[in-house]
Amino acid sequence: MTQTLSNRQSVPAFQLKSSIYTLTTLELHSPSIDELALQLASMADKAPSFFQQTPVILAFEELHSDLSFNLNRARHLLHETGMVLVAVRGGSQSLRKNAETIGIAWLPAQKSKKKSNVIMLSNPDSEMDIESIETKRNEIKPAVGPKIVETPVRSGQQIYAEGDLIVTSSVSAGAELLAGGSIHVYGPLRGRALAGVNSSDSDARIYATRFEAELVAICGQYKLTCQPDDSSWAELWGKPACVISDTGHLRIREL
């Protein structure tokens, strides 16, 4: 009996391993909770259930003062939209203590002004296309070969490629593709596709033999496509298409 207990105790209960996850950052430009509530409601109306179970970080670097900001209410507002507040970044010592009190992680402010994977929440009356964001400009790195995925990418899966990403099967709704270069999908594309991540290479493209993506992005320029309202996007819905970045806007073309 003693030997059995000793063997069990020698096996570690857990291991610490580093992992990389994509987190959405909500960069606040106004301390008004009411303005935050209005814009989150607009987001939910235009893309219902799109942000379900999306972990987010609230960034306070652009605010001159956060003393009146109700962090607990903000967490509940995000939860109603489907987002999960996992951390706050920057802000005053008072905000940091508030975060610790309600069990939210606090991250130090970023010194760089460059932003990646940011949704700006400032003007509730503005058009609800997810805002353009400035992406990080990394140092030049040696070219890498494409990553090839030959199995279906199912809902909840995230695939990342440092260079080009090639998927020879289908991509389900709720799945996410991220690539430092272009994305090629030889099948239905129904999830999210983000090309040129962490890069300023506007030559990145998104190709699909059947375009039905929920969201596309090239070099930080985002567009929700699950409810296409532009005629060019609607005409190519469900057809072979290519998404490009052209003078700061995402455009879709027939393959």
Image: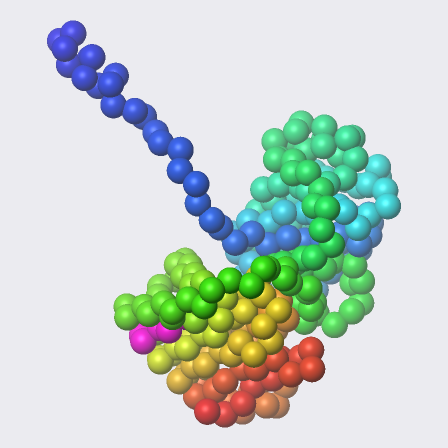
Residue at the location (37% across, 73% down)? 166
Direction from residue 136 to residue 162 in the image, left or right = left
Q: Position of residue 46 (x, y in %)?
A: 64, 69
The one of 99 and 197 positioned closer to us in this rendering: 197
Please tell me in which quadrant of the rendered image residue 227 appears: bottom right
Q: Which residues are magenta?
A: 165-169
Q: Is 254 situated above or below 62?
A: below
**Any magenta on residue 175?**
no
Q: Position of residue 72 (x, y in %)?
A: 70, 38
The one of 209 and 19 positioned closer to us in this rendering: 19
Please tell me in which quadrant of the rendered image residue 94 appears: top right
The one of 107 and 99 positioned closer to us in this rendering: 107
Residue at the location (20% across, 12% down)? 6
Direction from residue 67 to residue 19 in the image, left or right = left
Q: Position of residue 169 (x, y in %)?
A: 31, 74
What's the coloring here? rainbow
Q: How many marks?
A: 0
Quadrant (top left/top right/bottom left/bottom right) for the N terminus: top left
The answer to whether residue 194 is visible is no
* Dominant secondary structure (helix, strand or loop) of the stretch shown in magenta: strand
